[in-house]
Image (cartoon, rainbow, N blue to C red):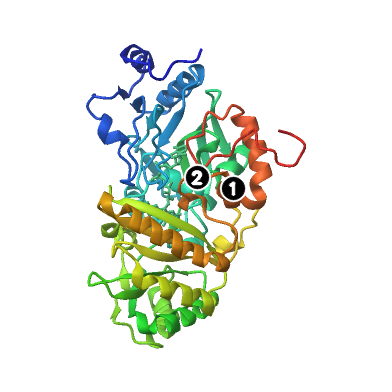
Amino acid sequence: MAVDAGAIGSSVRRELGSGLRGKVAGPGDRGYNTARAVFNGMIDRRPLAVVRCADASDVVRCVGFAGRHELPLSVRGGGHSVAGNAVRDGAVMLDLSGMKALRVDPEARTARAEPGLTLGEFDRATQAFGLATTLGVVSTTGIAGLTLGGGLGWLNGRHGLACDNLISADVVTADGRLLRASAGENEELFWAIRGGGGNFGVVTCFEYQLHPIDLVLAGGLSYPAEVAPRVLRFYDDFVKSAPDELSTAASLGLTPAGEPTLSIGVCYCGPVDEGEQVLNPLRTFQPPVDDGIQPMPYTALQSARDEGFPFGRRHYWKSGWLRNMTDDAIETLMRFLPQMPSSASGIGLQQLHGVASRVAPSATAFPHRAEQYDFCILSQWSEATDSDRNRRWTRAAFEAMVPHLEASVYVNNLGDEGPARVHAAYGENWPRLVAVKRTYDPDNLFRANQNIDPSTDTGSGQQ
Ligand SMILES: Cc1cc2nc3c(=O)[nH]c(=O)nc-3n(C[C@H](O)[C@H](O)[C@H](O)COP(=O)(O)OP(=O)(O)OC[C@H]3O[C@@H](n4cnc5c(N)ncnc54)[C@H](O)[C@@H]3O)c2cc1C
């Protein structure tokens, strides 16, 4: 029976709450405003109810409740989706951020992790055993959304993406079952959740492969704008032949004084003395203004960028894959950089490399398997009055870059950009994803995401 979202009140919230281990909050209740606030300060949405799930049984109950009443459902892990997909107006919001259990098996080098963990919480626990796996580069991000979309971080060259390190997941599907997905169980579901986002169910536990990670040789080099084109050309040649142990990211931005600047971040995860040799040409060919590369604990690297991404600032991102860093592409970037309206913003070129690039595009739902850069204009600012200016500049810079980019995009960078862009994020894997969606979520209960609509015509004659 459908419920009128406007009429739903405390009695329905009572029904939702009965038997739950976690708590339900509606408008006016304590915790409601904190839970509905997400990383991107542009997002101000009011769910019907927020359920702070305590465990998988709470998730099963909520999925059943939303399905029975035909209510929209959203899922919050770390709340970092720039599109704000964790929260929807009038929806039942499953807030999983309190589910933070983590069990490391140091012998098997695996970890079973609940979906409320942030990268920093995960890394701290696994590093206690000298272990880690690929996650992202800002430690406050949630493991859940990051892994389900792919997960590109400092270990990708040596160990693949976060989703490549997934051994299994527990998934609550739209029919209320709790399924285990792995290489040997519910294989199509397992394939789809490694890149297909939250389209197929709610993951209540991720099992990851871990790897020995000791000190890493990491940090950044910075350069003024005058030498940036030359450095970018050298950097592009250098990283193309770099060993898998080296993962890098370049970033263009403004100094606090408003001067255009280029920085190159690196992480070498093999022996430090080897890393010193590998990095020597990059560090010496053009003396940087600053060289912060040094041996450091992996957890220090993982939190090094956190300060630049505080919770609650306004964000607008535009993104695509850059395969060829041509002179024209560099010239375009350098032309737009000086007009960047906010010194908090950046133009990122995060390298997908080595092991992550050599996985077959159809082996997981994440199809972007090539040596290339995840190009992303990450605009951020504080005041609402600056929004138009920042968005305008971001769109103009992105449009100018489009001729240099692939037609595809990393799904986890997408804002609210429409179905064609979601399709572009899945490329050749789209028809198979639609087929898996039809099997596990034919009514599209899980649609507060970069949505794979099960009714899409995939050209297979089915709709
Ligand atoms: C500051 C910042 C830095 C970033 N850096 C990187 C990076 O280095 N590498 C990278 O790959 N990405 C990066 N990202 C992108 C990031 O991967 C996505 O924003 C991702 O969605 C964050 O996951 P979350 O759990 O925090 O997000 P949420 O907003 O909580 O969730 C995003 C979506 O994931 C789905 N979801 C979340 N939890 C579950 C679950 N348990 N079950 C089913 N579906 C679920 C839902 O559909 C939800 O809509 C970054 C983002 C930010 C804001």
Residue 302 falls in which quadrant of the image? bottom left
Q: Residue at x 43, y 85 (%)?
A: 281
- Where does residue 44 sit, x and y in percent of width and height? 32, 38
Structural distance between the alpha carbons of marks 1 and 2: 20 Å
Binning the other alpha carbons within 10 Å of mark 2 as few (below 14), some (14 to 19) or many (20 upward) gives many
Q: Residue at x 35, y 80 (%)?
A: 225
Q: Is mark 2 within 8 Å of ligand 1?
A: yes
Dot 1 falls on a residue whose secondary structure is helix
Amino acid type indicated by mark 2: Leu
Q: Residue at x 53, y 74 (%)?
A: 325
| Front-most of residues 452 and 395 | 395
Task: Tell me the number on the disc at residue 165.
Answer: none
Q: Residue at x 61, y 44 (%)?
A: 191
Residue at the spot of label 2: 148
Is 154 on the left-hand or right-hand side of 304?
Answer: right
Q: Is residue 247 above or below residue 311?
A: below
